[in-house]
Image (cartoon, helix red, strand yellow):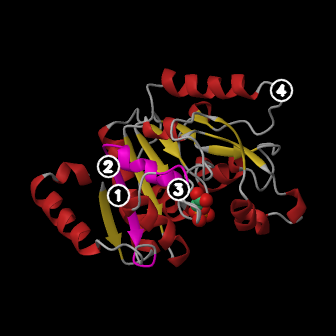
Amino acid sequence: MLVILKRDYEEVSREAARIVAGAVRAKPEIVLGLATGSTPLGLYRELVQLYRDGSLDFSRATSFNLDEYLGLSPDHPQSFHHFMQQHFFSEVNLPPERAHLPDGTISGDFDRYCQGYEERIRAAGGIDLQILGIGRNGHVGFNEPTSSLASRTRLKALSRETIEDNRHFFSDASKMPQCAITMGIGTILESRRVLLLASGRSKAAAIAKAIEGPITSSVSASALQMHPDVTFIIDEEAAYSLTEREYYRHVLEMTEQFTPERLS
Ligand code: PGA
């Protein structure tokens, strides 16, 4: 694992954008795995700016989002469809027919729908670069604690902590969905490269467990320790509880010197 320590949220966003932009330029037909939440907002803002400057082109890219709330239609202001439209898709030239999100309005045979989402990822060639945030409880996507480390896209009941963290986005807190459709940890681990972004002290405990703790379904992000190409980009506050910060800085220096392609 590479752990890139940055001073603050702005630096995290810029570094993530540098890596994503490099990946898109290196492979214009890239398949991106995208995340929602407050963490990747700065990354999207940077990518939109690069697109506007004419230095980035998404016209051949494809994307798959991690998750969507169950019961929310794409035009619901709190849906992840709406979030992606507002902060990214409406601002860049990624073709709408190649921007995929789980459908929050499905009912009935959830397993069949979720298998279809997995099949679409496979048919696109698999995810080249997956962007992740992390929940205070260590979740990635909506893979709440005790999610199987082999899980695939499925219907998932949200944890109390996640509902508390997100309830304030809903004008009527009682309308906060209780479930979501989310890619599984097994799905995420199949992507070729993973970038996890985190900022702020509220993420410090989850980050320390994910990077330095045991691999456990109690902390979904700890499963990333099994991934051969994962990069954590985190600010000082989110890194607060890591014990090996000096070593991560040394690894980064050595990587810059000997295998800089890992950072491009
Ligand atoms: P946040 O959410 O970026 O809004 O903190 C992260 C997550 O829950 O995965």
Task: Say what amino acid the circle numbered 1 marks.
Answer: Arg
Name the residue at 40% across, 32% down: 29
Q: From the viewer's perspective, is 181 left or right of 138? A: right
- Disc 3: which residue: 219
Q: Vertical placement of 67 versus 258: above or below?
A: above
Secondary element type, mark 1? helix
Question: Cα distance, mark 4 to mark 2?
Answer: 41 Å
Mark 1 touching mark 3, by CB under 8 A?
no
- Quarter of the image holding residue 202? bottom right
Indicate the position of residue 170 as horizontal and vertical percent values.
Answer: 82, 63
Label 2 sits on residue: 22
Seen at 44% across and 59% down, the residue is: 210
Residue type marked 2 = Gly
- Give the alpha-carbon distance from disc 3 to disc 2, as whole Å: 30 Å
Tell me how far mark 1 sits from mark 3, CA to CA.
28 Å
- Tell me whether circle 1 and circle 2 mark residues in contact (CB < 8 Å): yes
